[in-house]
Image: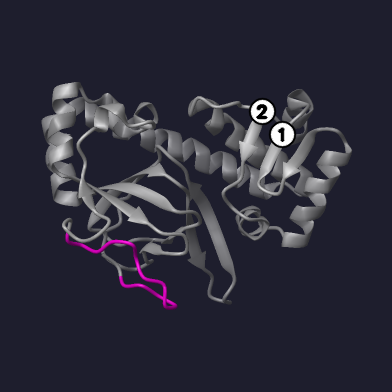
Amino acid sequence: MTRPHSGTALSAVEDPASPGCSPLRDCLHCSVRHLAVCSALSPDEVLALERVTVSQPVALGATLARSGEPRLHVYTLTAGALRLVRTLPDGRRQISGFVLPGDYLGLSGNDHHRYDIEAIADSRVCRVALPQMKELRARFPHLERKLLQRACQELDAAQDAAMSLARLQPAEKLADFLLRLAAREARLGGNGLRVTLPMGRGDIADHLGLTMETVSRTFTKLRQQGLIALPHLNTVEILDEASLHTLSGE
C-alpha cells in the first residue's frame, strides 16, 4: 500500500488482517454489484473472486495510491467517492475524474499509477492483487469481456469529457457534468433527477477547468433560470432536464 502524505494515514495497510480490512463474504448481495465488473460472474464464480478479495475502508482525506508508484492492485469502489488527481508542472491541480460506487480502477497499460487516488468521502473498495485478477481473467473469459466493455465505456467517457472541457461556456460544462452524474444516480437505482455531489465546488472547478467562483456563479445562474434547484449545498434537483440537455449540447 502507498505511503501516507501530509500527515494523512490510510485506513488500512497491506495486511488483510489489519484493522479495517476484512475478506468479503457476501459479494452476491453487494448493492453495486450490477454496476461492477463482477456482475459478469456466476454465483459459483463469485466465490472464487471472494477468496482473493479484501474489503478495505479508505477514510475521507486518505490517499489510496500515489502517482508514480507501482500498481499492485485493482479496485472496485463499493461506497463513497474518490478523485483522480494530477499535479501539473506549474503546481496547479487537475482532477481527471471522479470514482463513484461500482467503478473499477485498474484498466491501464501502465505499470505505475498515473494519478493520485484520494478519498473525498469515507469510502470502501474491494481490493484484488494484480496477479490474482490476471488469473481470474484467464479462468473466466466473460470477465475479460466485461473488462473490455468497461474499457470501451471509459474511452467514450473520456472523449465526452474532453469535448466538454473544450467548450467555452461554463454553463455548458456544468450542465454536461450534472447530467452525467444524474445518469449514474439512475443506474444506482436512485432518482435520476436528484443528484448528490460528493465533491466540493473546488473539485468541480479543477475537473472542468474553471475557477471555484465561476462554478458557484454558474450554479446560481442555472438555478435562476429554473433549470435546477439547490436544496442543499451538495444536492442538485434537475427541474428542466430537456433544457439542461440542450444547454449541454446533446
Q: In the rendering, at what x and y percent does residue 56 appear?
A: 29, 52
Which is nearer the eye, 53 or 117? 53
Mark 1–mark 2 CB contact (< 8 Å): yes
Please report the bounds of the magenta region as a residue range: 3-15
Residue type pointed to by label 1: Glu
Image point 61% across, 45% down: which residue?
197
Q: Residue furthest front?
A: 19
Q: Position of residue 245 (x, y in %)?
A: 72, 29
Three-letter amino acid code at the position of disc 2: Leu
> In the rendered view, does 168 fall on the left or right side of 142?
right
Alpha carbons under labels 1 and 2: distance apart: 6 Å
Q: Residues within 10 Å of mark 2 (few under 14, many from 20)?
A: many
The residue at which mark 1 appears reads as 237
The residue depicted at 88 percent of the width and 40 percent of the height is 224
Q: Quarter of the image holding residue 138?
A: top left
Is residue 145 something one can see in this rendering?
no
Mark 2 sits on what residue?
193
Q: Quadrant of the C terminus?
A: top right
Residue 149 sits in quarter: top left
